[in-house]
Image (spheres, helix red, strand yellow):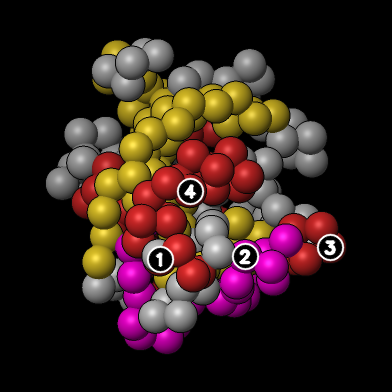
């Protein structure tokens, strides 16, 4: 894994001291170069590689995280279990497993690829733009989360109905519904027909 001074996530409070490089890609997900993280998110945004993780407990409930208030990008909003950017040259699967442990203190007991989705989501609050080629992963978690407070403000497990209620009430990341909808086929396969996803 490339040696870098900090982690390549969607806006960690610790990554302002050193430059973090993201992997730029074309519309087919082929690497075409690198760009400093904040610069890649400036309007109109540079298309870059990312990942999103959806972990479920044994009851088929989705683990959500509230992003820490110290993050420069989308602080305090709710989102999927974990998301971020691989280091240049790092496999998305490895990045997803690494960041899930770093942010939430858990290692998935199962983690499987669930396809990719490409999107362009401006964030009105920060003025930043998410132009991402996002690798999706679904999995199971059996240990209780032990979040890093620098990364995560709060966690909660939700059923589909509870998610609908929370999504109507609380702020969520601009990309959340896009990645959730793209991952739904794999989520249904993982959780089974009775979980309701």
**Residue found at the far bottom of this picture:** 144
Q: Earlier in the sequence, mark 1 or mark 4?
A: 4
Element assignment for label 4 = helix
Residue for point 37% across, 22% down: 24
Q: Earlier in the sequence, mark 3 or mark 1?
A: 3
Q: Is residue 80 above or below residue 61?
A: above
Identify which residue, 189 or 126, lies in the foreground.
189
Q: CA distance from mark 1 to mark 4?
A: 10 Å
Element assignment for label 1 = helix
Q: Earlier in the sequence, mark 2 or mark 1?
A: 2
**Residue 52 counted in the magenta span:** no
Residue 69 visible in this rendered orientation of the protein: no
Residue behind mark 4: 184
Residue for point 49% across, 70% down: 194
Residue behind mark 2: 160
Question: Mark 3, residues whose alpha carbon is within 10 Å: few (<14), some, or many (≥20)?
Answer: few
Residue 110 visible in this rendered orientation of the protein: yes
Q: CA distance from mark 4 to mark 2?
A: 11 Å
Q: Position of residue 4 (x, y in %)?
A: 28, 46
Element assignment for label 3 = helix
Q: CA distance from mark 2 to mark 1?
A: 12 Å
Q: Earlier in the sequence, mark 4 or mark 3?
A: 3
Residue for point 66% across, 60% down: 78
Question: Mark 2, residues whose alpha carbon is within 10 Å: few (<14), some, or many (≥20)?
Answer: some
Element assignment for label 2 = helix
Magenta segment boundaries in residue numbering = 138-164
Identify which residue, 52 or 56, lies in the foreground.
56
């Amino acid at each position: 894994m490339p040696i870098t001074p900090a982690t390549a996530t969607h806006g960690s409070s610790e990554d302002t001291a050193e430059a973090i490089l993201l992997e730029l890609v074309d519309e087919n997900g082929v690497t075409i170069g690198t760009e400093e993280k904040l610069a890649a998110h400036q309007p109109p945004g540079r298309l870059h590689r990312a990942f999103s993780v959806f972990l479920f407990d044994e009851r088929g409930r989705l683990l959500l995280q509230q992003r820490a208030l110290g993050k420069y990008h989308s602080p305090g909003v709710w989102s999927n279990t974990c998301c971020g950017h691989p280091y240049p040259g790092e496999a998305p699967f490895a990045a997803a497993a690494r960041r899930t442990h770093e942010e939430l203190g858990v290692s998935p007991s199962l983690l499987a690829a669930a396809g990719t989705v490409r999107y362009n989501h401006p964030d009105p609050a920060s003025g930043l733009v998410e132009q991402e080629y996002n690798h999706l992963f679904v999995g199971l978690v059996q240990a209780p989360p032990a979040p890093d407070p620098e990364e995560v403000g709060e966690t909660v497990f939700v059923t589909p109905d509870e998610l609908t209620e929370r999504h109507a009430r609380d702020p969520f990341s601009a990309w959340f519904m896009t990645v959730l909808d793209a991952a739904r086929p794999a989520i249904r396969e993982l959780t089974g027909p009775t979980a309701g996803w």
